[in-house]
C-alpha cells in the first residue's frame, strides 16, 4: 500500500466505532517496531515500543489529560539545552531550569513570598539516626578518580529520637571530605548543642578553641588569665590616659573601668606671676594668668573659676602670698566660694604678721561637686599703711578617689 491522503475542508480519520475495544496503529520497522494506540480498558492513549499494545509504554495520556512517562525524558541535546518551567498554583510561582544560566530557579508566588525547597523522607516510622533530607556536593567526573570523585561535602537533617506525636528532635549535620567520602565534622542539635566530629559536646564550662592552622578546633577547659594573656604584655612607660581602661570582676561579671575613676582627676593648678593691687581689707577674687596643669580643661582664665565637669569629692587648696609696700602688713585672708557663695561652715582662713613687708598663707578645704559646679578663690589683705598687693600665688584642686 502506498500513501493515504484525506482531503477536504475538515478532513477526519476515525479508528474504532465507540465500542469497548482497543485500537492500534503499528509502525513496522526493520529492527524495532513502535505503536500508538488506545487502551480502551484504561481509557489511555499510549505510545510505546513493540508491535503489541501496552508491551513497553513510553507515554500514556489518561482521560483527564494527565501524562505519564515510563522512560527517560530528554529535553534538548548536550550543549544545546532548553528551558523547562513548572508552574505552581499561585500566580508568579514556578520552578525553572534555566538553560542559559545553567541553574535551577525556585520562584515564590508574586504575593506570597520566597522560593521554597523541601526535602522529605518516605519513612513511615522515623527512628533515631534516620536521615530526613540531604544535600550533597561532588565532582563525579573528576579525571583523577578514586577519592576525587567521592562526595566532598553534605548537609543533612538526622532524627535524634524516635518520632512521635510530641517528638521531632532533629540534628543538622555538616559532613566534609578529607581524602575520604564526606564524614561528619559539625553537628547542631535541637538542644542548641554544638558537636565536633560527632556527638562531642564538651562539658560544662569548656570553651571551643582553635587548634591553629591545619589543626581541628576542640572543646577545652577555659585557660587562666595572667599578664601573658594581655595583648602586648609590656609595662606602661607613661601615665595612663584618662580614657584607658582596666577590667575587673564585679561579683563574677567582668566590667570595664576607666582609669580616671581611680586617678586623682580631674585636677588643675593655676598660678599668677605678677602683682595684683587690692583695696585694703576687701574680699577680692584673685586673678590668675597661667595654668600649670588642667587635665579636663575646666579652668576658666577669663572668669577665674574651675569647673571639674565630673561629680565627686574634691580637695581644693591654695598658696597665697601678699605684701604691703609700706612694710605694715597686718594680716592675710583667703576663702573659697562655691557656685558664687561661701560654703557652710565658712571657709575663711586668716593669718597675721604685724608690721611685716610680706606674708604667705596656705589653705585647703573639701567640697562635694556636681558636674557643673564651680569654685573661685577670694583674697583679703589688711595693711596698716601702704598699698596691699598680691605676689605669685597658686590655686589648685583634684578629685579624691575611693569616696
Image (spheres, rainbow, N blue to C red):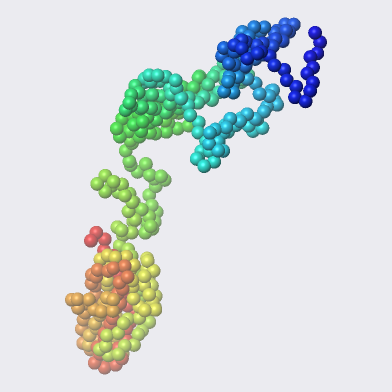
Residue at the image position 74 percent from the left and 6 percent from the top: 30
Q: Is residue 314 above or below residue 99?
A: below
Outermost residue to the right? 2
Q: Is residue 161 at least partly visible in the picture?
A: no
- Rendering coords of residue 316 (x, y %): 27, 71
Residue at the image position 31 percent from the left and 67 percent from the top: 371
For residue 15, what is the image quadrant?
A: top right
Q: Quadrant of the N terminus?
A: top right
Q: Quadrant of the C terminus?
A: bottom left
Q: Is residue 279 at least partly visible in the picture?
A: yes
Residue at the image position 24 percent from the left and 82 percent from the top: 333
For residue 395, what is the image quadrant?
A: bottom left
Q: Nearer the viewer, residue 127 or 281?
A: 127
Q: Nearer the viewer, residue 250 or 325?
A: 250
The total of numbered circles placed on residues is: 0
- Rendering coords of residue 3 (x, y %): 80, 13
- Rendering coords of residue 184 (x, y %): 44, 24
- Rendering coords of residue 58 (x, y %): 62, 15
Q: Is residue 321 above or below residue 131?
A: below
Q: Nearer the viewer, residue 270 or 302?
A: 302
Residue at the image position 67 percent from the left and 11 percent from the top: 24
Outermost residue to the left? 345
For residue 397, what is the image quadrant?
A: bottom left
Q: Is residue 45 above or below residue 111?
A: above
Q: Nearer the viewer, residue 185 or 290?
A: 185
Amino acid at each position: 500500500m502506498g500513501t493515504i491522503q484525506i482531503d477536504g475542508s475538515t478532513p477526519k480519520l476515525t479508528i474504532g466505532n465507540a465500542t469497548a475495544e482497543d485500537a492500534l496503529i503499528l509502525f513496522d520497522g526493520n529492527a524495532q517496531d513502535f505503536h500508538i494506540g488506545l487502551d480502551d480498558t484504561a481509557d489511555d492513549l499510549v505510545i510505546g515500543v513493540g508491535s503489541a499494545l501496552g508491551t513497553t509504554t513510553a507515554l500514556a495520556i489518561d482521560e483527564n489529560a494527565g501524562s505519564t512517562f515510563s522512560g527517560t525524558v530528554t529535553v534538548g541535546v548536550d550543549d544545546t539545552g532548553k528551558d523547562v518551567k513548572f508552574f505552581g498554583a499561585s500566580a508568579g510561582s514556578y520552578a525553572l531550569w534555566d538553560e542559559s544560566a545553567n541553574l535551577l530557579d525556585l520562584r515564590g508566588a508574586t504575593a506570597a513570598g520566597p522560593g521554597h525547597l523541601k526535602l522529605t523522607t518516605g519513612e513511615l516510622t522515623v527512628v533515631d539516626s534516620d536521615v530526613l533530607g540531604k544535600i550533597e556536593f561532588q565532582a563525579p567526573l573528576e579525571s583523577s578518580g578514586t577519592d576525587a570523585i567521592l562526595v566532598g561535602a553534605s548537609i543533612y537533617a538526622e532524627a535524634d529520637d524516635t518520632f512521635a506525636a510530641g517528638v521531632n528532635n532533629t540534628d543538622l549535620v555538616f559532613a566534609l571530605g578529607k581524602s575520604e567520602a564526606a564524614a561528619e565534622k559539625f553537628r547542631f542539635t535541637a538542644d542548641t548543642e554544638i558537636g565536633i566530629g560527632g556527638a562531642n559536646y564538651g562539658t560544662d564550662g569548656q570553651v571551643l578553641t582553635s587548634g591553629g592552622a591545619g589543626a581541628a578546633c576542640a572543646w577545652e577547659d577555659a585557660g587562666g588569665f595572667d599578664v601573658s594573656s594581655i595583648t602586648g604584655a609590656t609595662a606602661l612607660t607613661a601615665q595612663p590616659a584618662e580614657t584607658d581602661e582596666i577590667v575587673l570582676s564585679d561579683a563574677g561579671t567582668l566590667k570595664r573601668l576607666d582609669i580616671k575613676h581611680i586617678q586623682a582627676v580631674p585636677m588643675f593648678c593655676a598660678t599668677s606671676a605678677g602683682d595684683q593691687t587690692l583695696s585694703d581689707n576687701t574680699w577680692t577674687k584673685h586673678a590668675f594668668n597661667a595654668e600649670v596643669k588642667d587635665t579636663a580643661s575646666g579652668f576658666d582664665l577669663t572668669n577665674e573659676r574651675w569647673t571639674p565637669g565630673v561629680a565627686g569629692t574634691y580637695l581644693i587648696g591654695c598658696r597665697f602670698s601678699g605684701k604691703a609696700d609700706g612694710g605694715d602688713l597686718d594680716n592675710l585672708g583667703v576663702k573659697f566660694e562655691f557656685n558664687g557663695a561661701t560654703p557652710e561652715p565658712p571657709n575663711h582662713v586668716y593669718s597675721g604678721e604685724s608690721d611685716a613687708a610680706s606674708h604667705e598663707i596656705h589653705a585647703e578645704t573639701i567640697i562635694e561637686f556636681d558636674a557643673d559646679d564651680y569654685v573661685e578663690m577670694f583674697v583679703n589683705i589688711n595693711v596698716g599703711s601702704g598699698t596691699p598687693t598680691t605676689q605669685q600665688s597658686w590655686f589648685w584642686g583634684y578629685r579624691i578617689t575611693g569616696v
